[in-house]
Image: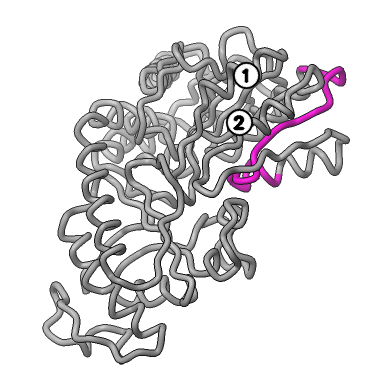
């Protein structure tokens, strides 16, 4: 059976170059970089090289990169660390109604348990942020605005530079969760004035358990893991050297390939989208001004989870939304915030591509989808054109 990965917003395969770069640090270059001998100094130098690679991807300075265990920790360090550093004079936290749970749940926890006033900004039907609501929310009481660079479910891109400029007018700090944007869009923090930015390695063909937080020069954060002096005193704990080196290599690859990968991936995504719209069945494309790799579509007359299961039976990995919320009974909070009905949100399908996606993958998916939809709607399934399958008996949806 053909295997097609269209769930790249959940995770990506580690690139061969990344695996090769990481390999020596498991066995040969195992010294603790905090020690004071030759092998340790060599490993510490390799961490600095990785720091430079991440900084180059983001348009940041070396001292502005803090290595973490991933996007969730980076978000927590940014938000908790900044709020603790600011103290009690500013008591309001502003975020959006469509944030990833790593930000959304944390902000609600801080409001419920630590007394912060929380404002969740609405979005329009196309997923774009309501900037008028942002302006209304801003005041000298606002400590921090946390707005994602790109949405993990719909791919909708927020105007982060504009958000930062408006928030800075009232003296608020600005954090952005750029986990989905890094490696898919050009990020130049010399020109986008956010104070804090989070990334995760496994979203850009790096290893799981790797991530980084950008902390702009002059911005203070209180460390959330205490102990040693690692990461300039901002994040204690022995460095996960293989993961850090892998993240650095993944960042370097993403930067080198951005100009060639993005147009090709966008063309494949658009071909997939055109194929869905040509099916003639009820379908809604969710979101406008999206990441080049992301397609979120609603089929209001089917169950999204059931459609994902049928695609899985035929070797296609997809999702209904965020992997962290899979298995829940409620439809996507992102789609509901965009005004979709319960049926439209429940019938959502997220298809997300990577640099490994091929034209054949898209063609195969467009062969399988019509029959899968007809099967779920209870109509007789038409004979599909199936790549790599001599008979329909090989397809789980026809058994």
- The answer to whether 335 appears left or right of 185 in the picture is right
- Numbered tag placed on residue 131 in the rendering: 2
- Picture coordinates of residue 397 (x, y %)? 32, 84
Q: At 80% across and 28% down in the image, what residue appears?
A: 92
Disc 2 crowd, CA 10 A, few/some/many (<14, 14-19, 20+): some
- The answer to whether 91 appears left or right of 269 in the picture is right
Q: At 41% across and 33% down in the image, what residue appears?
A: 182
Disc 1 crowd, CA 10 A, few/some/many (<14, 14-19, 20+): some
Q: Earlier in the sequence, mark 2 or mark 1?
A: 2
- Numbered tag placed on residue 42 in the rendering: none
Q: Which numbered disc, 2 or 1, marks the residue closer to the eye?
A: 2
Secondary-structure class at tag 2? helix
Q: Which residue is mark 1?
A: 166
Q: Which residues are magenta?
A: 86-105
Q: At 30% across and 37% down in the image, what residue appears?
A: 18
The part of the image, by quadrant, that contains residue 399 is bottom left
The part of the image, by quadrant, that contains residue 309 is bottom left
Q: At 22% across and 54% down in the image, what residue appears?
A: 271
* Residue 250 highlighted magenta (yes or no): no
154 and 213: which one is in front?
154
Q: How far is mark 2 from mark 1, CA to CA?
A: 9 Å
From the viewer's perspective, is residue 3 above or below residue 313?
Answer: above
Secondary-structure class at tag 1? helix
* Residue 96 highlighted magenta (yes or no): yes
Kindly check if marks 2 and 1 are in contact, taking CB atoms under 8 A apart as contact.
yes
């Amino acid at each position: 059976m053909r295997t097609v990965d269209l769930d790249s917003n959940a995770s990506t395969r580690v690139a061969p170059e990344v695996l090769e770069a990481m390999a020596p640090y498991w066995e040969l270059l195992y010294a603790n970089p905090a020690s004071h001998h030759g092998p340790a100094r060599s490993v510490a130098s390799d961490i600095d090289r990785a720091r430079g690679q991440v900084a180059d991807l983001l348009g940041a300075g070396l001292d502005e990169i803090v290595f973490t265990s991933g996007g969730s920790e980076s978000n927590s360090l940014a938000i908790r660390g900044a709020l603790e550093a600011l103290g009690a004079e500013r008591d309001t936290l502003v975020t959006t109604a469509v944030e990833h749970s790593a930000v959304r749940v944390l902000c609600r926890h801080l409001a419920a348990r630590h007394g912060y006033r929380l404002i969740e900004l609405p979005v329009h039907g196309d997923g774009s942020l309501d900037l008028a609501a942002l302006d209304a929310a801003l005041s000298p009481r606002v400590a921090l605005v946390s707005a994602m660079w790109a949405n993990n479910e719909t791919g909708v891109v927020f105007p982060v530079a504009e958000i930062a400029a408006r928030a800075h007018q009232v003296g608020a700090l600005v954090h952005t969760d750029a986990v989905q944007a890094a490696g898919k869009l050009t990020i130049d923090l010399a020109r986008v004035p956010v104070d804090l930015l989070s990334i995760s390695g496994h979203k850009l063909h790096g290893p799981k358990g790797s991530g980084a937080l950008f902390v702009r020069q002059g911005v203070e954060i209180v460390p959330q893991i205490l102990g040693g002096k690692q990461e300039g005193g901002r994040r204690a704990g022995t460095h996960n050297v293989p993961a850090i080196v892998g993240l650095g290599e993944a960042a370097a690859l993403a930067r080198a390939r951005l100009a060639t990968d993005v147009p090709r991936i966008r063309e494949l995504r658009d071909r997939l989208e055109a194929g869905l719209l040509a099916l003639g069945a009820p379908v809604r494309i969710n979101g406008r001004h999206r990441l080049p790799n992301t397609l979120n579509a609603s089929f209001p007359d089917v169950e999204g989870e059931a459609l994902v299961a049928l695609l899985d039976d035929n070797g296609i990995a997809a999702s209904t939304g965020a992997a962290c919320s899979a298995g829940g009974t409620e439809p996507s909070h992102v789609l509901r915030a965009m005004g979709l009905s319960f049926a439209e949100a429940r019938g959502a399908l997220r298809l997300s591509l990577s640099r490994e996606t091929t034209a054949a993958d898209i063609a195969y998916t467009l062969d399988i989808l019509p029959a899968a939809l007809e099967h779920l709607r209870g109509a007789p399934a038409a004979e599909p054109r199936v790549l790599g399958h001599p008979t329909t008996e090989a397809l789980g949806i026809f058994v």
